[in-house]
Amino acid sequence: MIAEYELSREADERLYVSLNQDGVCPLHFHRKIELVYIQSGHKTIISDNKKYFLESDQIYVADSYVMHSYEKSNDSTQIIIVLPNHMLRDYYLLYGDKKLATCVIKDQDIARAMKPFFLALAKKNPNPLINQGRVDQLMGHIVDTMGLVDREESFDHKFIEEVLAYIQENYKDEITLDSLADHFNYSKYYFSRMFNNYLHTNITNYLAMIRLQAAIEMLKSGQKNVSDAALESGFASIQTFYRAAKKHYKYEKIKDLVNIGSKITDIADFTEETDPNVIKKLSALSEDGE
């Protein structure tokens, strides 16, 4: 699947917990912070351009808007916790202009010392004050262990959330850099710089990814032909769809996009970017079509 902004998850303010299972998910991102404790076995996680190989009693943390995915493992179980934004208010208030310096805790002794907080949160105590205290303590330990660094530029959560939500709701319509900048009352140069800084891709690429995902889902349903799926997903023409598919996917025939199924592949194949620090950020692929 294409890297997806989880708009529905962003609106869900419940504490999410997955316990004693092998978590698998395509590349996605959200403002919420996602925590993964490896209980057993080995787990491969793709996060912000890099592939990490974790083993039991190690921790992965997906900071706000970091694109991440989990590959299937045959021998691993994890505790996965997604912290809702209302439980991160103290963290945002104190460290909103910073980001975690790393995304993994590989020191197993330190990780094991944090495990009781994961297990306690997984129980979802009916007293919200107790849960909040555990989140604050756990995030405090994570900050102390991982450290913080300044963001390259002041991070405006409201800006990126509103833009991504607007695109998600209107991608089928004609959207351009000019129209987006106009809608949000920014100059197109400032808007473009802000968008690129947050997502490490430009408006054109991001729109193409969202529209391709929608078109592929229509094709998978078997209810649309390529032309209808392309036009109903917001592409101006079937030729534009083919150009975008060829640019962002590895396939020989459109039908390969549907038949191969959802699969995380080499993200370097997904973009024309040449910066090695950006190449893998853009997306994991779903190699499927007509």
Image (cartoon, grey):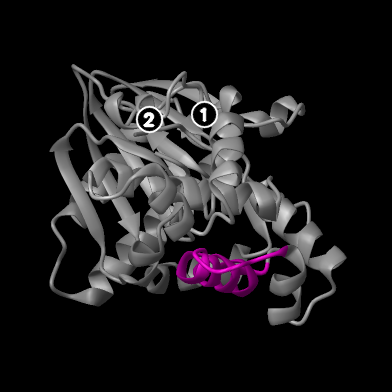
* Mark closest to the chain's N terminus, 2 or 1: 1
- Between 63 and 69, the one nearer to me in the picture: 69
- Where does residue 24 sit, x and y in percent of width and height? 27, 34
Q: Label the magenta part by its dominant secondary structure.
A: helix
The residue indicated by pointer 2 is 257
Estimate how packed mark 2 is, as few (under 14), some (14 to 19) or many (20 or more) residues with alpha carbons within 10 Å.
many
Look at the numbered disc 2 and give the secondary structure of its residue.
helix
Q: Which residues are magenta?
A: 156-176
Which disc, if any, is residue 93? none
- Horizontal side of 102 relative to 130 (left or right) equals right
Viewer can see residue 154:
no
- Horizontal side of 188 relative to 271 (left or right) equals right
**Up-down: is 112 above or below 84?**
above
Residue 10 on the magenta span: no
Estimate how packed mark 1 is, as few (under 14), some (14 to 19) or many (20 or more) residues with alpha carbons within 10 Å.
many
Which disc, if any, is residue 249? 1
**Up-down: is 204 above or below 87?**
above
- Who's the residue at 44% across and 25% down the image? 107
